């Protein structure tokens, strides 16, 4: 899941409906946001990574910082994707 860094990875378990994204997205004030511009290498790649992750079947989403989204992780990621598509990613 490149974007934050060229070699960023995320881990997905279909069996556990779990997605671990590290810093591919960030959680602030109970809302997901794309990785910060000042510490990311390619924001277009980050947006594409977010789009691909949103297509996975998961309920729990774990970011690199903060508490995980349990039960509503995919909905939170889809909401971020909607904001990105509308040009309001931040």
Image (cartoon, grey):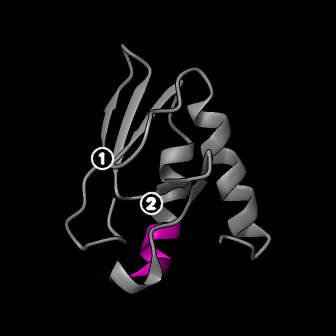
Residue 34 lies in the magenta stretch: no
Gap between marks 1 and 2 measured at Cα: 9 Å
- Residue visible at 48% across and 47% down in the picture: 53
User: Is 9 placed left or right of 81 in the picture?
Assistant: left
**Magenta-drawn segment:** 40-47
When asked about the image quadrant of residue 15, the answer is top left
Residue ID at (33%, 49%): 64
Residue topped by disc 2: 49
Callouts 1 and 2 close, C-beta under 8 Å: yes
75 or 69: nearer the eye? Answer: 69
| Residue 28, quarter of picture | bottom right
Question: What secondary structure is the magenta-colored segment mainly?
Answer: helix
Q: Nearer the viewer, residue 11 or 61?
A: 61
Question: Could you say which is closer to the camera, residue 14 or residue 30?
Answer: 30
Residue 10: numbered disc: 1
Using a 10 Å C-alpha cutoff, classify the residue at mark 1 as few (fewer than 14 neighbours), some (14 to 19) or many (20 or more). Answer: some
**Place of residue 26 in the rendered image (x, y in percent of width and height, measured from the top left):** 47, 57
Residue 66: % across, % down:
42, 43
């Amino acid at each position: 899941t490149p974007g934050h860094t060229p070699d960023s990875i995320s881990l997905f378990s279909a069996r556990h409906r779990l997605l671990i994204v590290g810093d591919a997205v960030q959680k602030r004030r109970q809302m997901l946001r794309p990785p910060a511009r000042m510490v990311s290498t390619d924001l277009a790649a980050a947006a594409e990574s977010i789009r691909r992750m949103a297509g996975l079947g998961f309920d729990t989403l774990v970011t690199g910082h903060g508490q995980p989204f349990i039960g509503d992780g995919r909905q939170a990621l889809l909401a971020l994707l909607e904001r990105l598509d509308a040009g309001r990613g931040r």
